[in-house]
């Protein structure tokens, strides 16, 4: 177990804001997990790749840095393969690893930043596919009761960018590994707007899984800033889901507002369109700003602090609420031990 005193956390989050912790424990194997000291959500924090988090101020206690690695095909039959993956593995590298073994199911999730452990917390999704379509089980360490536990897909309670690990039982479980059920025979998922067109522009009419992955990588690079160059946490706000009647009322006032029908007579709205309509795309307040590539992405131009980015997000929320009557919900986790 690696232990460091008063570490800087700036390089451990993709937003790159300055923060420190009293102590940091780096987990590299099962023995490290078993040796963890008592965990207090009021003082301590679990951190993986830091791609979906905004830390506002210092962490007074201990940061548990999850670096549990390892991946293997553990079972294969009837057109499927089951892959066991450590929470500390890089997500995009996992996608590439599965494609190299002719396993499909993750290609639409290419180039999503972060580590594997965040995937079930956030129910990551992109280009018409979510983790819930391939996840089978999650193995975790119960930080409250100091014991191993596992969860089936239904027990994870996955929904749109949410799970029991993010909402109902936040900070209780340290996710250590996940098991995925992938396909050995590829069936493309091209329903997402623009994906099929991107492939056709490349002259690809019958894509392989690698073709889909390559197309999505190109699309993401064209639309989203690289967090290794410009600090960001990807989409900072969720696309709001409203009732059909709410959507119809909004559409009467804003006929260009993109909408997507959802289950249960609900409609998903484009948060990016609303933010851009309010004039925020590309705007900058000091070192904090909104990407000129995508209005959903808040960026750190170099020296923005956590409080500055949080304040900017609040002004965007107010502008959207005043214009559309909808309060946007942040997608990244906002950690503020002083609040």
Image: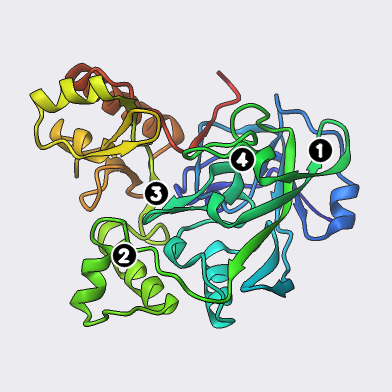
Residue located at (14% from left, 34% from top): 277
Residue at disc 4, secondary structure: loop
Q: Is residue 181 above or below residue 273?
A: below
In the rendered image, residue 20, in percent from the top left (x then y), is placed at 61, 40
Residue located at (38% from left, 34% from top): 309
**Residue of label 4:** 20
Earlier residue among tags 1 and 2: 1
In the rendered image, residue 93, in percent from the top left (x then y), is placed at 55, 70
Q: Is residue 274 above or below residue 291?
A: above
Q: Is residue 248 above or below residue 301?
A: above
> Camera-side residue: 160 or 140?
160
The quadrant holding residue 158 is top right
Residue at disc 1, secondary structure: strand
Residue at disc 2, secondary structure: helix
Q: CA distance from mark 2 to mark 4?
A: 31 Å
> Camera-side residue: 275 or 289?
275
Q: Is residue 239 above or below residue 10?
A: above
The quadrant holding residue 187 is bottom left
Left or right: where does residue 152 sit relative to residue 144? left
Query: In this rendering, which labeled residue sits more in front, label 1 or label 2?
Result: 1
Left or right: where does residue 296 sit relative to residue 65? left
**Residue of label 3:** 232
Instruction: Give the crowd class for mark 3: few <14, some 14-19, many >=20 residues within 10 Å.
Output: many
Count of numbered marks: 4
In the rendered image, residue 190, in percent from the top left (x then y), is placed at 33, 63
Q: CA distance from mark 1 to mark 2?
A: 37 Å
Q: For the N terminus, which image quadrant?
A: bottom right
Find residue 221 and name its label. Answer: 2
**Residue of label 1:** 142
Earlier residue among tags 1 and 3: 1
Earlier residue among tags 4 and 3: 4
């Amino acid at each position: 177990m690696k232990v460091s005193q008063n570490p800087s956390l700036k390089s451990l989050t993709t937003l790159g804001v300055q923060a420190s912790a009293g102590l940091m424990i780096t987990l590299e194997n099962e023995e490290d997990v078993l040796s963890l000291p008592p965990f207090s959500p009021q003082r301590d924090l679990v951190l993986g790749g830091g791609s979906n988090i905004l830390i506002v101020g210092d962490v007074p206690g201990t940061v548990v840095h999850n670096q549990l690695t390892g991946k293997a095909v553990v079972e294969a039959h009837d057109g499927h393969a089951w892959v066991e993956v450590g929470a500390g593995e890089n997500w995009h590298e996992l996608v590439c690893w599965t494609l190299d073994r002719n396993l499909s199911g993750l290609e639409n999730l290419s180039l999503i930043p972060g580590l594997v452990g965040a995937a079930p917390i956030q129910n990551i999704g992109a280009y018409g596919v979510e983790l819930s379509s391939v996840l089978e089980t999650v193995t975790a360490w119960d930080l409250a009761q100091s014991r191993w536990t596992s969860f089936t897909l239904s027990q994870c309670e996955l929904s749109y960018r949410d799970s029991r690990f993010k909402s109902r039982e936040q900070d209780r479980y340290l996710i250590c590994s996940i098991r995925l059920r992938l396909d050995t025979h590829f069936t493309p998922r091209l329903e997402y707007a623009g994906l099929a067109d991107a492939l056709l522009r490349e002259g690809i009419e019958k894509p392989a899984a690698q073709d889909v992955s390559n197309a999505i990588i190109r699309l993401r690079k064209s639309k989203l800033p690289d967090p290794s160059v410009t600090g960001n946490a990807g989409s900072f706000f969720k696309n709001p889901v409203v009732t059909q009647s709410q959507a119809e009322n909004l559409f009467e006032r804003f006929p260009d507002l993109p909408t997507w029908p959802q289950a249960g007579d609900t409609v998903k709205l484009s948060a990016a369109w609303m933010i851009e309509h309010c004039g925020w795309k590309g705007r900058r307040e000091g070192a904090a700003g909104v990407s000129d590539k995508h209005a959903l992405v808040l960026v750190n131009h170099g020296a923005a602090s956590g409080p500055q980015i949080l304040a900017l997000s609040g002004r965007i929320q107010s502008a959207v609420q005043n214009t559309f009557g909808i309060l946007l919900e942040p997608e990244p986790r906002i950690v503020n031990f002083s609040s």
